[in-house]
Amino acid sequence: MRILVLVRKDLLRAWRDRRAFVVNLLLPLLLTFIMGLSFGGGIFGKSGISVIPLVAVGEDVPSALRDRLAEQLAETDFFALEWADSTEARRRVTRGEAAAAVVLPPGAVGDYFRGEELRIDVWKDPGRPLKAGIVEQVLQRALRQVQAGEAGYRALWPDDEESMPPGAEEDTWSDLFAGDMNTVWKRWRRVGGEGGFTEVGEWFLARMDHQVALSDAMAESRLDLAVTDAAATPDVAESREINLFSYFLPGFSVFFLMFGVAASARDLHRERAAGTLQRQLLAPLGTNHIMTAKWLSSVVQGAAQMLVLLVAGAVLFRVDLGPDSWSLLTLVVLTATAAASFFMMLAVVTPNEKVMDNVSTTVVLVAAMVGGNFVPVDAMPAWITYVGRWVFNYWSNSGFSLVMVRGESLAHDLQPAVVLAAMTVGYGLLALAFTAWQRRRGGLL
Amino acid sequence: MIIVENLVKRYGSHRAVDGITFEVAKGELFGLLGPNGAGKTTTIGVLSTLLPADGGRASIGGHDVAGDPGGVRRLIGVVPQEIALYQDLNARDNLLFWGRIHGLGGKALGTRVERLLELVALGEHARQKVETFSGGMKRRLNLAAGLIHNPEVLFLDEPTVGIDAQARTKLLALIGDLAADGLTIIYTTHYLEEAEQLCHRIGVIDQGRMVAVGDKEDLISQIGDEDRVRVQVPSERHRALTSAAETWPGVDSVSERRGKLEIRVADGGAVLPPLQAWLAAEGLDLAQLEVIRPNLETLYLNLTGRGLRE
């Protein structure tokens, strides 16, 4: 209960601290608003991207053709194509290892050459809208070219190779285009007599069938590109409207949360300097009580700040918070707990508020960079992504991408939640152990 | 109530508290007098369980400070040198918070808070943020926070630092009332007059050591009850003045001290007429004359050779 007394005190102070209110809530809200408006202008317009990893599925595509395609795409320095079976392809896209999977159904190539329709599935990673969008556009263009090529082929090489009735060839086309059906008719009767009528009629109908087939080829392709998010099953794929700001709002929110929680952890130094920490230690409280209460109040403030920003994004900019509110809430709380543990640890190992201020600001900026708060992680070099995995915000961003962008629940991929929970416990225990050690040697004062 | 034996506290090789021993009886107001850096605050830190001792032992109300810190904390209240309050909360909320973390609550806490606010004359400012208070008001509230859980022993660590004379007088009167009510108090200060005015007994502390302990009269008697008249004359006339002074009534001894002659006499005023007459007869102007009556400061100077307000 005394922990709650301590938490209540911190929350009361935070509530009455106008400066903290402005810095931790109003300023982030204002910046979120400005950023939300900025996205209306298309922030991706000039951004460069790295090689796009693609995976292709085509179980009966000849290996020579597979290798040739992979080589040609690699030569563009824009795509890296690998072939895989459908299960592996879905796994890679779902886990963000490939921007999209291009799936050719079994027997598709042969069927197409036999004149049957061909449906090509594209499973895209909703967490990589930029790269998946590029893949989709490239495929659409390629299919249009194939369609145009087919139509041109049919026009140039009609499958009906019969010649026109003898003697009628010379002027028939000009008469037809002139609309002079009377002359055409007379000529056909003159040339073919009574039997010629039937012969010319058949020839005419064959030509009309050819023209209809050519028109159909241009109007309706036998090629169909079906694009779905990898998170949805192919059979029940639902089309979700993804707001571009949805990809960035969680990142911004986590960034502001880091600053807010760092400021809250710095309060430990302020209390030590003011003597209120010593006074608390004189009450029947352990250091664990005091640290846990400080951690808890940081969590409450951080989670509240983040929820306000997310809700503001949803209300003001129609950001989709995802279909699973519990997953979103769990992720917000886990992000706040991991951040609070991390910055509490930083607070207890730094000697004073000034050092803590400098260290935490540096850490927040670096972690935000490598953890994907400013630039999507998939647009960064692989080594930065590897470094990012060591900071909690990387996992928060991954989790929010899963919940808000892909529309999944946390249960679909537990890794972000598990890592955040582990970081919460790990950093928290380190902070408690260090504080207890400091207390024993009187270093807390 | 408080027993301290050979208490030692080291910071690296520096002995901040170096074998201090003293006792404080129940209901006594005990002063720890010493200059800045003498070891007063460190002693309070160890006795209040905030700092671990490196040697010796101490107990409060029968509870060993090292062995039963929880028992000690239940008995004590501490008013630190700093204003250990939440500046962004009002006076009432501060006291409610400190009461709650000591396990108080409900109506009893509310009544206690109101009583303390009245006691420290802040009843009208209960809803005012502490950051808007004057230095004296903050000091009084700081004192109230140390009393919120009704402790049996109160440590006051230089509670009048940084406040004006009027506020100090008010605060000292308040502390005097608490002592009169039977609260056991350890009061650290480097203001001599505060210790003389308030404390039943005084321990003089310097460089981590207790150099003298006793009531005011005991301490002064340690340096004798004679006045000292110090006079500066040319050194070649020291012998002549010494011979003359030894004949004056009440003079006990004459000695040379740091280039001056020091005349020990029962009543310093009585030697001034013959001294003036001697100087006139010798054709000398009075360069410097000092009459020192025995008090705590002279005791301290005698013991340490340093001023109290260093």
Image: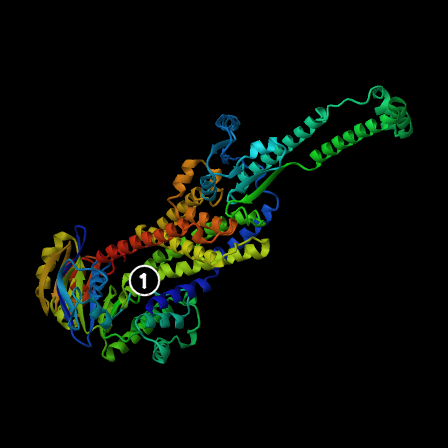
- Element class at badge 1: helix
Q: Which residue is mark 1?
A: A290
- Left or right: where does residue B284 sit relative to residue A59? left
In the picture provided, is B25 more to the left or to the right than A392?
Answer: left
A431 relative position to A144: left or right: left
Classify the position of the C terminus of chain A by image quarter. Answer: bottom left
| Chain of the residue that carries numbered disc 1 in the rendered image | A
| Whole-percent x, y for residue B109 in the image | 35, 77
Number of callouts in the render? 1
- Asked which quadrant contains residue A279, the reply is bottom left
Q: Name the residue nearer the viewer: A330 or B113.
A: A330
Q: Amino acid at mark 1?
A: Ile
Residue A437 occupies which quadrant of the picture?
Answer: bottom left
Residue B261 placement (x, y as % from top left): 14, 58
Could you say which is closer to the camera, residue A384 or residue A190? A190
Horizontally, residue A431 falls left or right of residue B239, namely right
Frontmost residue, A285 versus A367: A367
Task: Identify the image's colour scheme: rainbow, by chain, secondary structure or one colour.
Answer: rainbow
At 75% across and 23% down in the image, what residue appears? Answer: A162
Packing grade of label 1 (10 A; few <14, some 14-19, many >=20) is many
| Residue B265 x/y as whole percent | 12, 67
Coordinates of residue B132 in the picture (x, y in percent): 43, 66
Query: Is residue B81 visible to us here?
Result: no
- Specify whether residue A157 is in view: yes
Closer to the camera in the image, A349 or B216: A349
Tell me the quarter of the image containing the N terminus of chain A.
Answer: bottom left
| Location of residue A170 by image quarter | top right
Q: Residue furthest front?
A: A195
